[in-house]
Image (cartoon, helix red, strand yellow):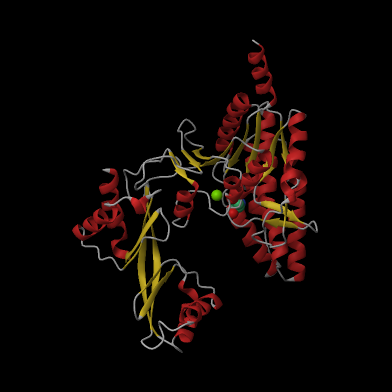
Amino acid sequence: MRKFADRRRLRCIIVPMRVLKFGGTSVGDAERIRGVVAIVRGRAAADGRVAVVVSAQSGVTNQLIELAHHAAAGHADPAPLRARLEGLIADLSLEPGLIDDELDELETLLRGISLVGDLTLRSLDRMMSFGERCSARISAAAMVAAGLPARAYMAYDVGLVTDATYGSAHVQPESYERIEAALDAAFDDGLLPVVTGFVAKDGDGYITTLGRGGSDYSAAIFGAALGAAEIEIWTDVDGVMSADPRIVAGARSLDRMSFEEAAELAYYGAKVIHPATIQPAVWKDIPIRVLNTMRPEHPGTLILRASASEPGVRSIASKGGITAVHVTSHRMLLQVGFMRRMFEVFERHQIVIDMISTSEVSVTVTTDNPKNLPAADAELREFSEVRVDGDKAILCLVGEGLRDVPDVLTRVFAVLQRESVPVRMVSVGASRINVSLLVDRGDEKRAVKALHAEFFGV
Ligand code: ASP
Ligand code: MG
């Protein structure tokens, strides 16, 4: 009897807490925002403690960047942006002056930038911050109008501090305790915080941003700070798919996957959170669920430290626009320092290397950003022969324990042979969970379809 009572008391003290993050399309128009309000209401009723993190309305961050550049060039017209956001406020029947302070500040800043005729990274961050700042105010007001105890918070007012790397700032460790204290106080007052994603301030009080798509990072930071039981990332797809549905009509969403699998897929533009951004969640071992705002009843994909499923192929991703660079040196390849010299050239020219394969006399690397290759090429030629091979694609099979499943490679090569797809490069071994293949761009879609049929039956 006593034991039972204790357990009940315990349940009252440890209130499960959830962070819900809504992306740009999820808050993109009045109808979607009403959907968000319904989702938040459901979660708040079930869980007690809920914190919401919002992105800017889709397209707004790009619009702000463009405005900043126009201002620096002499003239920027914020009227269309103002009209869009005020239209949204009207559609939601909210108080018209809701974001006047932000919009006025935005206009002042634009005048300042055009006066100086120069756009610094710091002022660009302040420009970009208006998207999330307005979004948080609008979303919170929509929730209040629907009877929820919501309140908008600027992330930097509730403890989020970063370094001063404008444009892609990193969280400072003291943020976690500060956020916990600030939001616990809000929870104790019975409030439902609606916090800006993407924005923060540095130690000197200047606004910073966390990198494009950075609201996921904010969600992970807030989730870690609050010891959330789960972080929900609400987007516009049914979680992580077994392949890009634009290529494979029968692609299906995965119930669960590991953080590492999600990280591998992120490179391929799969609609998953970015690996670097979910680090705070990985660190605290907080599960992340990717959900679809347009189909809230769909269970989405649960991303966990261990996917706890059978080893095998979970997802097949691909990426076109890949360039292969073959570097050959009969004289020097195996000499000490050759690799270092080669990679130094790539580093100097900011060329990110994705796949590497070596033979006795040559090294092949791939990159998805060949913009600076011509300059690097000249330097590489000082000590080797170089051949650049454009128009390639990387195919990637991802799955925990993949390397240890004996017949995966056999099946992959049998499928590609049947489809007459020449394989230009293979990389296994680098991680336990991915097999990457380089093929010609023209073969990309056919290969993905055939591989998906082989491993998923559709
Ligand atoms: N609004 C920001 C962007 O467009 C951050 C985000 O949406 O996650 O990059
Ligand atoms: Mg995003």
Report the front residue among 236 and 219.
219
Q: Residue at x 30, y 49 (%)?
A: 452
Res 325 seen here: no
Q: Is residue 218 above or below residue 2?
A: below
Which residue lies most toward the top here?
A: 1
Spot occupied by residue 95 in the image (x, y as percentages of width and height): 72, 36
Q: Is residue 159 visible?
A: yes
Residue 369 in picture, x, y percent from top left: 47, 69
290 sits to left or right of 315 = right
**Along the line of sight, which residue is nearer the eye, 337 or 165?**
337
Give the mark count: 0
Residue 152 rendering spot, x and y as whole percentages: 72, 39
Task: Note whether 430 is above or below 160 in the view shown.
Answer: below
Q: Quadrant of the N terminus?
A: top right
Quarter holding the C terminus is top left
Q: Nearer the viewer, residue 261 or 295?
A: 261
Please tell me which residue is depicted at 35% across the width and 67% down the height of the picture.
Answer: 392
Question: Residue 424: x and y, percent?
Answer: 30, 68
Asked if residue 301 is positioned above or below residue 64 in the image, the reply reads above
Where on the picture, by quarter, is residue 187? Answer: top right
Q: Is residue 410 left or right of residue 362?
A: left
Q: Residue furthest left?
A: 418
